[in-house]
Amino acid sequence: QKEVEQNSGPLSVPEGAIASLNCTYSDRGSQSFFWYRQYSGKSPELIMSIYSNGDKEDGRFTAQLNKASQYVSLLIRDSQPSDSATYLCAAQGGNKLTFGGGTRVLVKP
Amino acid sequence: GAVVSQHPSRVICKSGTSVKIECRSLDFQATTMFWYRQFPKQSLMLMATSNEGSKATYEQGVEKDKFLINHASLTLSTLTVTSAHPEDSSFYICSATREADTQYFGPGTRLTVL
C-alpha cells in the first residue's frame, strides 16, 4: 500500500511568518512530488513540483526533497491570510498520484 | 494554459437516478484523464484512470458498472454515476495530464443524492 503521510494540523502561523509543512512517503519508486493548495469547497491548485533532491524555490514557496529519507517539505515565507488553506502533498509513481491527507494552515493577521 | 473544466459544478438528484459529469481540457490535448472522489475532511481518492479510446482502469474497490467512464476524445471524458444513492454524495474531481506527469485539476462537481 503506497502511503503519503502529513500532519493534519491545523498549523497556525502569524501573518508574515514562515509556515513549514512536512510530508513522508512510503514508496521508494516515487519519482515526482507535488504540493497542491486546496481552499474549502474548491479543487486542488498546483503550487510546486519537485523531482530531484534539494531545494526548489518559486516566489514565497520553497519545496525540499530528500529521497533517502523519503521526505518532502514546503516552506511558505511571509505567510498571508490568503495562504490559509489545506496543503496536499502528492507522490507520483508511474502516472498515478497518491495524496496525503493534507495539512490545514491558518494564517492569523 | 492547462485549463480543465467540469460540468456541472453542482448537481442534486434523487436516489436511483443516473448523473453524468463532463471533464474537458480546454487548451490542450490530454493524454490521460483521472477521476477522483473526495469526501468531507478527507483527501482525494483516485477512482479511475482514463485514456482516449480505451477502457478506463479502475482502482481497487471502485465498481466499474456503477461509475461508467467514457473517454471519447483527447479533450473530453465523462463519468456517469448510475443508480446513485446517498452514499455516493461526494465531491468529484477530474484531472488531465498535458505533459508526462503534471496533473491539472478541474474545479470539481459536488453531487448530492437525496
Image: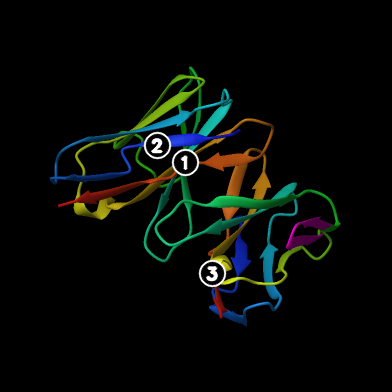
SS at badge 3? loop
Q: Residue at x 68, y 77 (%)?
A: A16
Using the image, name the chain to which the residue with label 1 belongs.
B
Query: Does residue A102 appear to the left or right of A95 in the view shown?
Result: left
- Label 2 and label 1: CA atoms lie apart by 6 Å
Question: What residue does disc 2 label?
Answer: B6
Using the image, name the chain to which the residue with label 2 belongs.
B
Q: Residue at x 39, y 44 (%)?
A: B62
Using the image, name the chain to which the residue with label 3 belongs.
A
Question: Please, what is the three-letter code of the amino acid marked with disc 3?
Answer: Ser
Q: Residue at x 52, y 52 (%)?
A: A44
In the rendered view of the protein, which quadrant contains the N terminus of chain B? top right
Question: Please, what is the three-letter code of the amino acid marked with disc 1?
Answer: Gly
**What range of the chain is rendered magenta?**
A56-65
Q: Position of residue A56 (x, y in %)?
A: 81, 56
Q: Tell which circle, 2 or 1, labels the residue nearer the N-terminal end.
A: 2
Question: What residue does disc 3 label?
Answer: A84
Name the mark nearer the viewer: 1 or 3: 3
Q: Residue at x 14, y 41 (%)?
A: B16
Q: Position of residue A32 (x, y in %)?
A: 73, 47
Label 2 crowd bin: few (<14), some (14–19), many (20+), radius 10 Å? many
Residue nearer the viewer, A15 or B107:
A15
SS at badge 1? loop
Residue nearer the viewer, A79 or B82:
A79
Does residue B74 appear in this view? yes
Name the mark nearer the viewer: 2 or 3: 3
Label 1 crowd bin: few (<14), some (14–19), many (20+), radius 10 Å? many
Looking at the picture, does residue A90 appear above or below residue B48?
Answer: below
Q: Are marks 1 and 3 in contact (CB under 8 Å)?
A: no
- Label 2 and label 3: CA atoms lie apart by 25 Å
SS at badge 2? strand
Question: What residue does disc 1 label?
Answer: B106
